[in-house]
Image: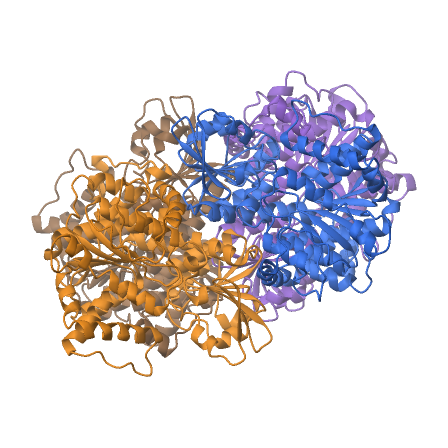
Chain colours: A brown, B purple, C blue, D orange
Amino acid sequence: MTTSTTAVPFKVADLSLAEAGRHQFRLAENEMPGLMALREEFGPSQPLKGARIAGSLHMTVQTGVLIETLVALGASVRWASCNIFSTQNEAAAAVAVGLTGTVDAPAGVPVFAWKGETLEEYWWCTTQIFDWSAEAAAAGDTWAGPNMILDDGGDATILVHKGREFEAAGAVPPASASDSQEYRVILDTLRASLASSGDRWTKIGDGILGVTEETTTGVHRLYELAKSESLLFPAINVNDSVTKSKFDNKYGIRHSLPDGLNRATDVLIGGKVVFVAGYGDVGKGAAEAMRGQGARVIVSEIDPICALQAVMDGYQVTTIEDVLDQVDIFVTGTGNENVITVDHLLGMKHLAILANVGHFDNEIDIAGLEALAGAERIEIKPQVHEWRLPSGRAILVLSEGRLMNLGNATGHPSFVMSTSFANQVLAQVELYAHGENYGKQVYVLPKHLDEKVARLHLDALGVKLTTLTAEQAHYIGVSVAGPFKVDQYRY
Amino acid sequence: MTTSTTAVPFKVADLSLAEAGRHQFRLAENEMPGLMALREEFGPSQPLKGARIAGSLHMTVQTGVLIETLVALGASVRWASCNIFSTQNEAAAAVAVGLTGTVDAPAGVPVFAWKGETLEEYWWCTTQIFDWSAEAAAAGDTWAGPNMILDDGGDATILVHKGREFEAAGAVPPASASDSQEYRVILDTLRASLASSGDRWTKIGDGILGVTEETTTGVHRLYELAKSESLLFPAINVNDSVTKSKFDNKYGIRHSLPDGLNRATDVLIGGKVVFVAGYGDVGKGAAEAMRGQGARVIVSEIDPICALQAVMDGYQVTTIEDVLDQVDIFVTGTGNENVITVDHLLGMKHLAILANVGHFDNEIDIAGLEALAGAERIEIKPQVHEWRLPSGRAILVLSEGRLMNLGNATGHPSFVMSTSFANQVLAQVELYAHGENYGKQVYVLPKHLDEKVARLHLDALGVKLTTLTAEQAHYIGVSVAGPFKVDQYRY
Amino acid sequence: MTTSTTAVPFKVADLSLAEAGRHQFRLAENEMPGLMALREEFGPSQPLKGARIAGSLHMTVQTGVLIETLVALGASVRWASCNIFSTQNEAAAAVAVGLTGTVDAPAGVPVFAWKGETLEEYWWCTTQIFDWSAEAAAAGDTWAGPNMILDDGGDATILVHKGREFEAAGAVPPASASDSQEYRVILDTLRASLASSGDRWTKIGDGILGVTEETTTGVHRLYELAKSESLLFPAINVNDSVTKSKFDNKYGIRHSLPDGLNRATDVLIGGKVVFVAGYGDVGKGAAEAMRGQGARVIVSEIDPICALQAVMDGYQVTTIEDVLDQVDIFVTGTGNENVITVDHLLGMKHLAILANVGHFDNEIDIAGLEALAGAERIEIKPQVHEWRLPSGRAILVLSEGRLMNLGNATGHPSFVMSTSFANQVLAQVELYAHGENYGKQVYVLPKHLDEKVARLHLDALGVKLTTLTAEQAHYIGVSVAGPFKVDQYRY
Amino acid sequence: MTTSTTAVPFKVADLSLAEAGRHQFRLAENEMPGLMALREEFGPSQPLKGARIAGSLHMTVQTGVLIETLVALGASVRWASCNIFSTQNEAAAAVAVGLTGTVDAPAGVPVFAWKGETLEEYWWCTTQIFDWSAEAAAAGDTWAGPNMILDDGGDATILVHKGREFEAAGAVPPASASDSQEYRVILDTLRASLASSGDRWTKIGDGILGVTEETTTGVHRLYELAKSESLLFPAINVNDSVTKSKFDNKYGIRHSLPDGLNRATDVLIGGKVVFVAGYGDVGKGAAEAMRGQGARVIVSEIDPICALQAVMDGYQVTTIEDVLDQVDIFVTGTGNENVITVDHLLGMKHLAILANVGHFDNEIDIAGLEALAGAERIEIKPQVHEWRLPSGRAILVLSEGRLMNLGNATGHPSFVMSTSFANQVLAQVELYAHGENYGKQVYVLPKHLDEKVARLHLDALGVKLTTLTAEQAHYIGVSVAGPFKVDQYRY
């Protein structure tokens, strides 16, 4: 349990919002059997007792159940969202106030997140999860920092690394012309920090035992840091657990893409032509969802193997240029930039819909669109904008090009997040208990834990697993209890 | 155009709501190519000039586009919703104020509908669409009634028939013990009417040239009236146009069932067991949608032919009793009563979800649930109620057992409604122009008009139709222009 | 049982072939629960006792089970195939010799059919099913003809009508230049008949109580005869039973199209582009089967309603010309002529596959292909021909443009034929018992018999039907036992 | 080209069979774009010149195209099948005689394979691919052995290893009581060899540069040999190329499972209950195929991750015991033994179908069935046996429990084999050119070659690949030309 109830500097921490969120927690817990099972298994032994976790991950109801699970295992937690739009205010309020689900009498967890933050607010929130002075004061200590990071996209991790780098340099460099607006805000944030303390981030970095990272993007950053030998602490790559990447990405998007499209536009998906850029796990889930609603799906790919999978799954595979004016809904899930350019936008059908479920808002060149002379933006409703183009046609951009399954819907559903978050919890437990055994590298969870996460979710779906006989296990050279596959097995 | 702008007795007719609705009309029009094509084709000739249409149909954005189309063809219109929950207030406001889509300078249409009416309010609203005194006064007449009804479910039609019946009898009978609460309200409404006028409904009934009816339920009532020779005017059964029943029911539900489930509960559909009661067009669409999201679907049927279709389509077909405790989501689409009884409810899994997409709130025995001792109702959010049962488990009831695709989502999407409503418009045009050629019977639209409705929707979906050669048309004994099938063809 | 074992003038009636067929009958019976149930229900009462049935229908194992069912109900039977390629010789032999399935000691049924008949042989075979002289002789009578026809495609029926017509005219007209080769053979056949008897077909026609017809094509011919008031006896249109047209066509083709493609070509269907001409029941089954194997399906349609269904089901809908050179497999299921012309053939990809599952071999213009200068035909194996075209490319034509699901595979599987044939048996029983109540018109089976056919097939698939309560039945105005739908219900 | 035409000791090498096979080669080549592209790319440089390949792989038409490709790249080849039932005699004949496809004037390749070998014949055939005395003689050499093995299942490899082991020991051990019948034949074969030569296999083993292995089973054996440091030469694991395991297994089975069921039984798959044991790639393809034909699929799994995938894909997941008497078709694809036991067989529905697409005939306990008192086997047709059980019911066993997609159909289709075999060819080229760089370990092909195989198959399917811009490639840290994914990417 957190010990601080006085310091809840949360914009939306009012009781009526929290009350509105509380019922959703009960429903979410019913849909997150993995987390609930971990509470039951590990609650008594309190393996996270003493852990001070700085969490940066979309502040939704599901994340609330994760936070409560971490707390139930003994951790203290401070939390920010990792996206300016993705916070569900009633969930944030309920966590902040302590009105969540079945955990008895939680005292409230400091949450720094609300829907629609500015970039300045966003990075201020992120700094707050590293400021454990209230907790230190309550404990009679002069200083405390977090000892664990739970990250999504790497923003919390990057802040520590950059902060320490600039402290070592003694100065924050000026922004260069090519720096993004967001990077300028980061520089400003750290410049202000350096002005007030010369070793704040250095001390924080020293205190951290490890980070567990949720996403492809964040993992990519971690591997870069490890490659350049500048990673400050061990990292567990949660993203590449099978029960994360092959579930969250594929089945989560299958659910939340049509959900977001429906809430945003109410447009009939059946009979429409949907273009899906990228046929990785995200694209596979997106294509299946759209076909399941009666759309005709066209896929683009750069990787010949994924392209061959797409065509063998019955989809037309071609370039965006080839079908630009036949498509009703464009979905991007590549993780790359400029997949849809301004030139593409100008060639689209009237009121074509643009939905990004990849990562950043540069998959669709939103910056280019904003700079386009003669383009006019009309807000249909929050997160749904009609852009009237010089061509005389208009397009509908969802969530300003950011993740529309979060911005226009409520993100992945609880059950999917339960598989991801069960990996997070196991990774936190592992690193907190045995961080000293790990080098400053990026690790994945061992297969038996991956299988464990899956196992925790079977009962709720009525699955009856078959058990090997001893003879059968011997015949294929595995243990009756698993793990059942070689590490490189692709599922 | 309506001539009355002064009398907009609409609860939600404020300008800011209307502004919020206006953008949605532009998007809806893009998705309703059938209605827009009919405006283009018939706008110049004004075939509905002089028509005074009393409309009773869910007051959504799509219905707004229908209303504007009727107006564009020359009609005057007054409108009520046919369901206490289904009104989209911003759509109602926009229609009432006249801020809809592309029709220039509409003066506003009297609309009597808001989300969440009481039964008393609902029937008051329905009486208002028959009160054309303001229009009469504006035209300098002493009396005017509607000359057409556009109905959904038959409530407007039944009010006229019951009103006239009681006027002929000189009295409204007292409610009997077995009468539903709703029927009591109807009796009260007509009792008040009779107190103020002895021939109001008789005059209204005399003035009506015909009714066009949208739904199975309403059509069933019309056939009953025709069978008993008490139908007061000709009726066109729009429901049984192929482009209505096989599109609205199947493809509409395929879209709006998952949409409603998602907005109401955010529960992952993938991996769940979904029970679909009834494998008619509604059930077919429901089952396809759930399978398309990765659910396992179990179907129940009373009709061996539909049961055989379901099993040939790969679904398990069994009774609800057989799988009661294995099901996560129950969907009813039968059009019958007590498909799910209180005993069934008591045997369900904890937090099983109940979603009715059939017709009335008696498919699931909500009245029985409300009467169940020890059952407690908790509002999670509007239209989503957790019922804690004496069994210690809880269930989630959507839209209080009424149509959840309307109550929890926004009903069928525009494109689907465009096919239904194009049939409505053609039926209104036909009956208004040639009503005198029809007897007091129930008719369906001729096949060439049904095919015309389909044809109006092909371009928007990029469909290129093949044209028969004269030789081929001769070979199969049809005209090159169609119709292409015998009347009994099943599609 | 037939009494004649001496007269089995069947080309393939040898015992070893029959032995090879006999096991297949046992398996087929297990898959034809409808026919087996009818044997059980009607065997004791022998409703076909005295019936002499002239049958013309593809001589497969399934038809053998039908024949045995007719015999089990008391009928005498003579049989021909209705297609020169569709006979399974081992099935014909087993029926002829009497080595079929579970019926005890059948004495053998005269069968006139073998795979690969010439047109002359085909029409000779058809005449043999009308020659009951052996049966007459065995019974001590001077003459006997059939009193029932069971027809598929109308060839048996047409032979009687034409025979009688020419006998009335006293002469068979010479063939005209535009007559097909097949019609010339019919004229020759009847010319020979007239030479030996002036009233043979007149007497046969007089003796026939009715015909039950299996197919769209045959039904079409019957309606033409009825319209021109020249139909000689009542007809039951078995084709338009729901349990025939919506099952045989859709689910039968879904099974037998890929089966035929595989046996003929072994070409991977996954990843290929398949063009399906026509989206009636046949096309719907074809498209579903191809998609189910991972192909991308493109549909063509002339009917806007069916076109709209296809696009709502997620298929691209366009003309054949638009995609000619992108298609790997062409499937025709329209029932029309020249759907694929020689010009189309010349524009196709190298080794494109042509598969007709519609009706005649003129859906693809095979005659035009045969007349094409420079085209060369190479037999890859029976029913699979490579045509080298003057374009330098080649195409693969299956079954010479005739029904490839029969020619390259074994036709619809037993279970599907059980639904069709149960309708046939019920229709034969009805017409034989009550033919005198019927006019010289075309009738469909009443809905309760249609539902009965479905009901007979549910147990075998593990289906548990739900039963209405009396209150529910009353609520929707039906009997608890059905029928459950209005006649025009589309399923 | 092979230089030996004299020595074609092949049972089925007659010209008329070869003629029958020749057309199939032309069609197969059209479906194997990967192999044809490799011929074009590498034909001029002859990278396999001097290679003497001992090949052991199902002797089908597709393998014939592989053989011709190896020859076209310069290799000499001797070939046996790796399964006693899988040889297509006309393909074997055509290869032996040299009448295959488009390769000009091949002189014929020594082939030792026919459909339906005894175990003794099978192992004799396998020894023949190592006997290059005829080639040696033709070249004027005293001795020659193969220098490469191309293996499927490891039988050729194991023969060399066992032969060498026994030569080193100076004796072949007697069979023990627990040895399988097949292992006894191997021992006999090697005993005879040892009697005639004491160093034959030692010399062969010394001469081999490497082996490329096709299957999971063979790869498993190789890893075991490598682990025990007894592997005699480097091995490339072709099975675990993505373009092999994720294509051959999944898409191949999706095609060939229903094909085999249809050819074997003609049973309607639609509406049936199909049990799929194992949800690896094979099971995934099997389940998809059965669902695509309208069956209801139930899956069993031992691995919780694969089980979770199955349920998320919409399948019921349970144990075989739970649904034993409801299943119409059992499909095994686990790679384990005794997945279906005799007890299971006794509890099945009458005429339940058993289809193994895993690996050996012990997935279903055929040996146990053969030993069951009171069980009677009836041959319906080759590879289709009805077993009458003491329970009074019967079951249908396909291909005697061996791979039914090979035994009852023609195996994976050409296109799928083109992806597998393109990997084989690239692996042979790599090992033959650079074998000395490899240790005595098991390797997989590098990702760029895997992607190359995919790339070679895109054009034939009309796929248009998208190309990264330099900026995009830089953004995600890959080369524009690929490889695009990290090694552990799961696809």
Q: Residue furthest top?
A: B44
Residue D223 is situated, as x and y percent measured from the top left of the image, at 22, 66
Q: Is residue B381 left or right of residue A456?
A: right
Looking at the rendering, which quadrant does residue B247 occupy?
top right
Q: Position of residue B390 (x, y in %)?
A: 61, 70
Q: Nearer the viewer, residue A385 or D342?
A: D342
Name of the residue lying farthest toward the left: A169
Q: Quadrant of residue A328?
A: top left
Position above or below: A141 against B475: below
Determine the residue located farthest toward the front in the rendered image: C196
Q: Quadrant of residue A319?
A: top left
Residue B285, x across and y down, in percent = 58, 47
Quadrant of the drawing holding the N terminus of chain B? top right
The answer to whether any part of residue C483 appears in the image is: no
Decide which of B480, A230 is in the foreground and name it: B480
Quarter placement of the C terminus of chain B? top right
Residue B452 percent location from the top left of the image: 64, 27
Residue at the extreme right: B169
Image: A425 above or below B404: below
Viewer-closest of B467 and C173? C173
Residue name at image x 72 percent, y 39 percent: C219
Q: Is residue A45 visible?
A: yes
Report the number of numbered marks.
Answer: 0
